[in-house]
Amino acid sequence: MSGCSHRFRPRGLCRGAVLTLAFGCALATGAATGSLPRESDSGAGPQTRAVSSTVAPVDRQEIEDAAAEAEADGKSAKDAAEEVVSRSGDRWGAVYDEREYEEFEQALDGSYTGVGLSARRTGRGDVTVSRVQAGGPADRAGIRAGDRLRTLDGRAVGKRPVAEVVALLRGDGTGAAEGSRVELGLVRDGRGWTETLRRARLTTEAVTVRRLEAGPSPAVLVKVAAFTKGAGADVREAVRDAPDGAGILLDLRANSGGLVTEAVVAASAFLDGGLVATYDVRGEQQALYADPGGDTDRPVVVLVDGGTMSAAELLTGALQDRGRAVTVGSPTFGKGSVQMPSELPGGSVAELTVGHYRTPAGRSVDGRGITPDVVAGERAQQRAETVLSGLGGGS
């Protein structure tokens, strides 16, 4: 599964409440929508996600009217709202019921219902397992990173978007809960088999840290799987605790976003204040700034790929534009539009595109992504370590 602080995000939904700034994402463990601050009666801020910049804004009043009319007729307000959003052409516009939105909030807190695996699409078009959470249902069943996912509950994965595949694994939109079953069709080394897993309530480990192999200079790998609550502070702590002079390899591959406030906190680990990003909501310009006092001396390399999205792209763009890091890998996804959530009759929530964000240099990420300074393919991490070593902080 982001200015206001995450401390201000309410536990539930209520009109006039302010949601934390987040970007729409398929969090490392499941699909989730994201949010900048929720629009409210008091004029709170936006919600951010990526969408084609050619889409015209959806009339929020039209959606609210359709939902209210359906509610009065005893029909589904959510279905009526979804029909309006679908006709609008807003690719990332969506409507969520209360349970789905609660799942989203739990995902941003680092908790989710699922089977404990992440997926990505390879260059050949296959959907493969990119990461397996230790101790989760997938791990206990012996599923490994690199296994190819063919079917879910007997239905071919085919060309489904990866975010949709992960949502199906979680049971989003189907009412599937903790303990429900899901059947996976898998392939490994040419051998196909099926596994039936039970979904479980899992907690993500958003940030992992390890020392790279000893070399002429010390280096630390900081892997951020998603910008869930507390991830920014974990990055800052990892930088603070790194040995003196150690370079930082910040791995944002397959990081599909999360809370933007957490990405800004992470940026503050490397910057001494200053601009992180700007965004607009219906023409009104806003800005996000890093806190002063970050470590501006350590060499930093940011590792990215096509699965680097939203809040992760915001952080990448800030460090690249500010000359604070060398970026290595493949072009990022390009998810950078602003959405505003609003509560509808019946308790569902609609998210509609209202603007876009830009990097400190004014670059639009939406639909374009970020091209790394050093383009590298399958051996991207090795290349990144070489670059970091050349900066005086690698292995």
Image: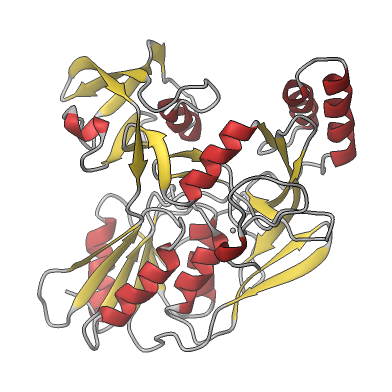
Most extreme residue toward the top, as rendered? 154
Q: Quadrant of residue 289?
A: bottom right
The picture places residue 69, in percent across and down from the top left corner, at: 89, 23
Residue 395 to residue 231: above or below: below
- Of residues 385 and 36, which is closer to you in this image? 36
Quadrant location, the C terminus? bottom left
Identified at 58% across, 32% down, the residue is 99
Residue 206 to residue 70: above or below: below
Q: Quadrant of residue 373?
A: bottom left
- Of residues 73 and 284, which is closer to you in this image? 73
Identified at 41% across, 76% down, the residue is 325
Figure label count:
0
Q: Is residue 93 left or right of residue 200?
A: right
The picture places residue 192, in percent across and down from the top left corner, at: 21, 16
The picture places residue 333, in percent across and down from the top left corner, at: 51, 49
Residue 173 seen in the current view: yes
The picture places residue 127, in percent across and down from the top left corner, at: 36, 30
Q: Is residue 356 left or right of residue 140?
A: right
